[in-house]
Image (spheres, grey):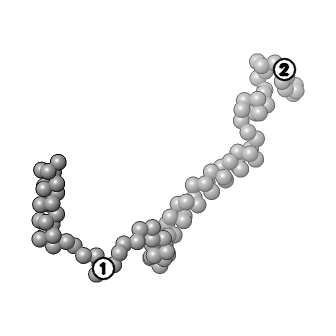
Amino acid sequence: QLPVDFRNPLSRRRHSRLRGMPPPSAAALEIFKFSVYLSVPIFLTAAVANNDGVLSWVINNRQYVTYPPEETRKLPSVDDMKARVASIKASKSNA
């Protein structure tokens, strides 16, 4: 068989690197990396979502919003709200 003529673009037998194809070992490496890239987040999501202990631990240890206790929070009475509305109306009528 004749050797590949790399200078002739019309040569029928061209090396795979000239066509932009990686060698088989590099293709296998890319397939492995892509499968790891996809499988790790899917596996971790499934592991956390299916395990109630881990999910409750994450929720309890990552509380970004802290609400005040219910007994310390007081709602204004109806009379207080009426007094506020009256004071706002009085300040608007004076202005």
Q: Position of residue 28 (x, y in %)?
A: 70, 49
Residue 77 in view of the camera: yes
Q: Position of residue 3 (x, y in %)?
A: 88, 27
Quarter assignment of residue 38: bottom right
Q: Work out whether 28 lies above or below 49.
A: above
* Residue 7 circle label: 2
Q: Work out whether 64 lies above or below 74.
A: above
Who's the residue at 71% across and 35% down the image? 21
Who's the residue at 71% across and 50% down the image? 29
Who's the residue at 76% across and 33% down the image? 16
The answer to which of marks 1 and 2 sits earlier in the sequence is 2
* Residue 72 circle label: 1
SS under mark 2: loop
Residue 51 in view of the camera: no
Q: Residue furthest bottom?
A: 71
Q: Residue furthest front?
A: 94
- The answer to whether mark 1 and mark 2 are in CB contact below 8 A is no
State left or right for residue 32 relative to residue 53.
right
- Disc 2 marks a residue whose amino acid type is Arg
- In front: 36, or 3? 36
Q: Position of residue 70 (x, y in %)?
A: 29, 78
- In front: 64, or 26? 64
Q: Residues within 10 Å of mark 2 (few under 14, many from 20)?
A: few
State left or right for residue 16 relative to residue 95.
right
Quarter assignment of residue 5: top right
SS under mark 1: loop
Quarter assignment of residue 6: top right
- In front: 77, or 41? 77
Disc 1 versus disc 2: distance between alpha carbons?
84 Å
Locate the N terminus and report the quarter of the image it occupies: top right
- Disc 1 marks a residue whose amino acid type is Thr
